[in-house]
Image (cartoon, coloured by chain):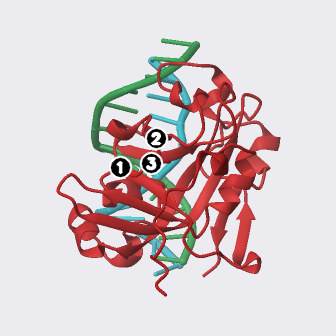
Chain colours: A red, B green, C cyan
Amino acid sequence: MSTLSDLTPLPRKFYARNTVEVARELLGCLLLRRLPDGELLIARITETEAYDGPDDTACHGSRGLTPRTRTLFGPPGHAYVYLVYGMHELFNIVTDRAGYPAGVLIRAVEPIQGEARMRMLRPVPRRNLANGPGKLTRALAITREHNGLDLTTVGAIWISAGQAVPPWKIQCGPRIGIDYADEAHRLAPWRFWISS
DNA sequence: CTCTCGATGTTCT
DNA sequence: GAACATCGAGAGG
């Protein structure tokens, strides 16, 4: 049958473990977005990055609990959305356990359903529609209003399992845009993507 | 294709 | 006041 047959949210248990593991397994999963007018947008996750706790100098949580990072310190399975560079909203999923700041940044998705609407929200050619962390939030109308949202229940945003990705199609490498981090964390291969 | 650079506003020092 | 988990335009190859 259709790959869209099961749109059930992934359970909290899925997120409540090591964030690197979760980042890898989120590849191929579906990101679902129910717009205020009822339209359902569906996108397949194709690139992720793991941020792992207080000792990871690339992780926002490494500088302590602040108003911005409050949700990152909270229980897993919630959305952590924040603004960077004064104009881009970035969508993350909180992982591991409460009190331990860890999460997965969703860096790229590809449209599965509702592409026409996505291209109204972000009018560019398909190949550039959602292939970046600031692009996909625009195409899916995800904003800081969604910060803290529980992703394990059906609502404005949730994640479902999608179709498994063969291990040989999964690549990994250093994370992007974290030159400020210590060398070990700059080089850690915690970025994952599906090879095309 | 590559590289460089400016935009923009929130957060933390 | 500096830095920032980015993007797109413009110049050059």
Q: Secondary structure at mark 3?
A: loop
Q: Secondary structure at mark 1?
A: loop
| Marks 2 and 3, how far apart at CA | 7 Å
Residues marked 2 and 3 touching at CB (< 8 Å): yes
| Marks 2 and 1, how far apart at CA | 8 Å
Q: Position of residue A100 (x, y in %)?
A: 69, 29
**Quarter of the view holding residue B13:** top right
Q: Secondary structure at mark 2?
A: loop
| Marks 3 and 1, how far apart at CA | 6 Å
Q: Are marks 3 and 1 on the same chain?
A: yes
- The chain carrying label 1 is A
Residues marked 2 and 1 touching at CB (< 8 Å): yes
Q: Nearer the viewer, residue A160 or A124?
A: A160
> Residue visible at 78% across and 50% down?
A187
> Residue visible at 73% across and 44% down?
A17
Q: Is residue A170 placed above or below A77 in the rendered structure?
A: below
| Left or right of A22 on screen, residue A130 | left
Residue, disc 3: A153
Type of residue at label 2? Asp
Q: Position of residue A163 (x, y in %)?
A: 58, 76
Type of residue at label 3? Thr
**Quarter of the view holding residue A34:** bottom left
Q: Are marks 2 and 3 on the same chain?
A: yes
Q: Residues within 10 Å of mark 2 (few under 14, many from 20)?
A: many
Q: Nearer the viewer, mark 2 or mark 3?
A: 3
Residue, disc 1: A155
- Label number found at residue A150: 2
Q: Position of residue A32 (x, y in %)?
A: 40, 61
- The chain carrying label 3 is A
